[in-house]
Amino acid sequence: MTRAFLAILKRDLALASRAGGGGELALVFFLTIVVLVPFALGPDLNLLSRIGPAILWLGALLSMLIGLDRLFQGDEEDGSLDLIRASVLPLELAVLAKGLAHWLTTGLPLALAAPLLGLLVALPGEAMLPVAATLLVGTPALSFIGAGAAALTAGLRRGGLILPVLVAPLTVPVLIFGVSASNAALGGTIPFATPFLILCALSLAAIVVGTLAAAAALRQSG
Amino acid sequence: MTPSSDPILTLEADALTCRRGGRLIFADLSFRLRSGEAIALTGRNGAGKSSLLAMLCGQLRPEAGTIRVEGAPDVAPVELSHVVGHRDGLKTALSAHENLAFAQALLGDAALSPAEALAKVGLPHVAALPVGYLSAGQRRRVALARLLVARRPFWLLDEPMSALDTAAQAMLSGLMREHLAQGGAILAATHGPLGLDGVREVKIGP
């Protein structure tokens, strides 16, 4: 069973790194959004550094949505999903492996790139690491909330347009606590740990609920 | 989970009724697929052959009736079956070898290695090529090689001969004969001959 789990994880990582896999597309999109915002706001460095964490979080959230519709749709179209259904691995664990691969190829690179992109929004040096840390623990929630929605839309032809509409409202708590933890690191009355721990809890809950929901949705479709 | 020393297994479908999108496809279909037996599933286009296969592998819930495996009551039929359908289940960006290695890890109870299976379907030279570069017939053969990398008693095939040239059709008939001789069972939805002796026909619809 471990072998089947690792096989799915390894295959999805390999697919993301091959041509057309879309592994680096999220990162480029993230860069694009963060670069565009200062142009729209004008040369007000104080304003930029104040809303910097919010820009980084919004950029990461939107970048995670890019390509999320393909999470199960690709497997549904070519019949790989039937193969996964026929495996000895419970569908929940298969979803967990795919969600994990999605996070490793999108969420993790975004979190690692955040300190670098923080320079573009005049983020103070001491806030770089906390912002990256909030993205690191917050993005798994986005991957797995997205997995639930991606499973629901796996059989739809134009699922790519519906998916962000389904996912965005569900990500509001993650966004709120992600940004407030980042702002707490910049100073303020709330200690950093309070929103940060809630963010961790949100991610853990999303991993469980998202996995179960996606597996249930995949059992219904087919 | 999959028993490797096979007891005598029988796939039993009892009084199946299929309804899709409110339309009745077929009703009250029963058959038994015994070890060592091959069934050719026939019927006009749209009679519900693929729907029946989807039901057998658990993708579609029957409106009425039951599907079970006699001899292994706790195991879902799909976990004892190989399914090769219209959608070949191959990733075009991965090589033939990678695709088969993935299927082997996923399906469990390994039989031949991916390289041996590819040699057996006559494609030893394409192992390292991305499946996207292969022709329709070659892709079909890679999908059929999946039958050989893991041991499963039931082969559920949808139009297995499509896209295959005559040599490849004879090769597939040979593989099916070997599988039957080893105590396996085959259910194939088909319009043409399977090249096997003693095939029982189950006809859906009028």
Image (cartoon, grey):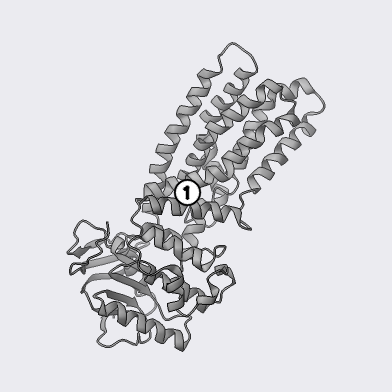
Q: Nearer the viewer, residue A106 or A74?
A: A106
**Which image quarter is the C terminus of chain B in?**
bottom left
Q: Residue at x 63, y 36 (%)?
A: A112
Q: Residue at x 56, y 33 (%)?
A: A136
Q: Nearer the viewer, residue B53 or B1?
A: B1
Q: Tell which residue pokes out farthest to the right in this image.
A: A43
| Residue B165 position in % (x across, y down) | 48, 86
**Which image quarter is the N terminus of chain B in?**
bottom left
Image mark 1: chain: A
Question: Is any atom of residue B203 visible in this view?
Answer: no
Q: Quadrant of residue B18?
A: bottom left
Residue bearing the label numbered 1 = A98
Q: Please determine whether, in this image, residue A47 is positioned above or below residue A188.
A: below
Q: Residue at x 45, y 60 (%)?
A: B102
| Residue A37 position in % (x across, y down) | 74, 33
Q: Nearer the viewer, residue B184 or A212?
A: B184
| Residue B148 position in % (x across, y down) | 38, 71
Count every numbered label the image shows and give the total. 1
Q: Is residue A201 left or right of residue B82?
A: right
Instruction: Residue type at mark 1: give it.
Output: Lys
Q: Quadrant of residue B183?
A: bottom left
At label 1, counting other C-alpha atoms closer than 10 Å, the crowd grade (few under 14, some 14-19, many 20 or more) is many
Q: Please determine whether, in this image, residue B196 is positioned above or below residue B81.
A: below
Label 1 element class: helix
Q: Residue at x 72, y 41 (%)?
A: A32
Q: Quadrant of residue A186?
A: top right
| Residue A115 position in % (x across, y down) | 67, 31
Question: Is any atom of residue A9 visible in this view?
Answer: yes
Q: Is residue B203 left or right of residue A31?
A: left
